[in-house]
Amino acid sequence: MSNLKISQHELLPFDFKAKPIMEGYLELLNLDTSDYTFSANYLWLSNGSGFYSIIENTFCFFLLVNGEISMLLPPIGLQNDIIKSIPICFNLMEENNSSKNHTKIEYVDELLVSGFINYIDPDSEIGDLLEDYVVERTLVDYIYDCNDLIELKGNNFSAKRNEINKFKRIHPDYLLETLDVEKHSDGIVRLLNKWISDRMKYLPSDQTELFIDGIYSERLAVKRMLDYYSELDLIGLVIIIDGKVQGFTVGERINEDTASVIVEKTDFDILGCAQFIFREFVKKLSSEYGVSRINVGDDMGFENLKKVKMSYRPSLMIPKYTIYKRQ
């Protein structure tokens, strides 16, 4: 991929050369939000091409789709540098784009928002950013305490415990293995294809197009995960039943205290498998990597996914915002 030049700014391809540079800037923030890692963005970059530039000593990450540029993250750096770089980034996008609808900064962590807006009413979806921008609350990340997910104490988790016990009773010979790309790739791809097929059977017709768009991104993310597993410093776990991969989950360490779950898939036909592998993955992340919190990302606006993530009783929900230039 070649460089992209807009005005006096040169945008470089978002490839593995960007990894140490981006991670150096991310260390200045130390956020728990799932979007603020190189690996998460590299895996899910499917709908366009990624570029970056260092502007006002901040790492600025851009997405190019059909000739239009937006930002997948706010400028990353120290607070004063971020405030200085935001107007420059918007000017850059405006100069390139044919419409202001594409000129936006997505996935802005609430801590960064609070640093450069005048005021956000906690009961409102809209806040004022200086005088020229609008901030819209969009999604939230769901974060849990590891001990809560491991112990599953109390009535709130009785259904989860029952599902796990049922799984262990029906499949006493299951095997848990750390993900090994050479050993497990074929089984992971087979399971993903079956998951897609099963999901399509029960999908309402009015959701088919949205699902197909989403599954394209997910298939590409899984392929990239398998191709660059070691280079991306990923952590994975698979469950084997009767010699077949029937579940897999992959995540990463976001910072010293928090890890994330990037993708998880299990066979729909195996009851309790999803609950079981999730708990076992949390155990692995806690015992082997010393983290105390798990971020499972946002719900992408899907009500059913929101219900599942709320059912695990998050200890913290981190709002994320989109910034637009006023029309």
Image (tube, rainbow, N blue to C red):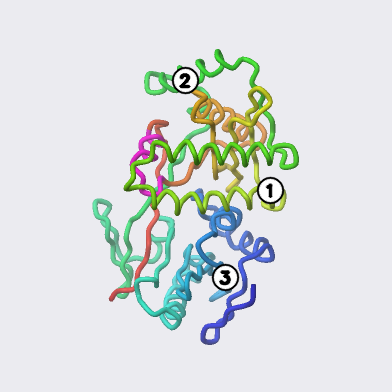
Query: Which one is nearer the viewer's eye here, 164 or 125?
Result: 164
Q: CA distance from mark 3 to mark 1?
A: 22 Å
Which residue type does callout 2 highlight? Glu
| Mark 2 or mark 1, earlier in chain | 2
Query: Which one is nearer the viewer's eye here, 16 or 185?
Result: 185
| Mark 2 or mark 3, earlier in chain | 3
Q: In this figure, which residue is indicated by the disc labeled 3?
A: 51
Q: Are marks 2 and 3 in contact (CB under 8 Å)?
A: no
Q: In this figure, which residue is indicated by the disc labeled 1?
A: 229
Residues packed near mark 2 inside 10 Å, few (<14), some (14 to 19) or many (20 plus) = some
Q: Position of residue 211 (x, y in %)?
A: 42, 48
Q: Quadrant of the C terminus?
A: bottom left
Q: In this figure, which residue is indicated by the disc labeled 2?
A: 163
Going by the image, does 87 lie left or right of 179? left
Which residue type does callout 3 highlight? Phe
Outermost residue on the top side: it is 169
Please provide the residue range marked out in magenta: 299-310
Q: Secondary structure at mark 1?
A: loop
Q: Position of residue 217 (x, y in %)?
A: 51, 53
Secondary structure mostly seen in magenta is helix
Q: Residue at x 59, y 43 (%)?
A: 251
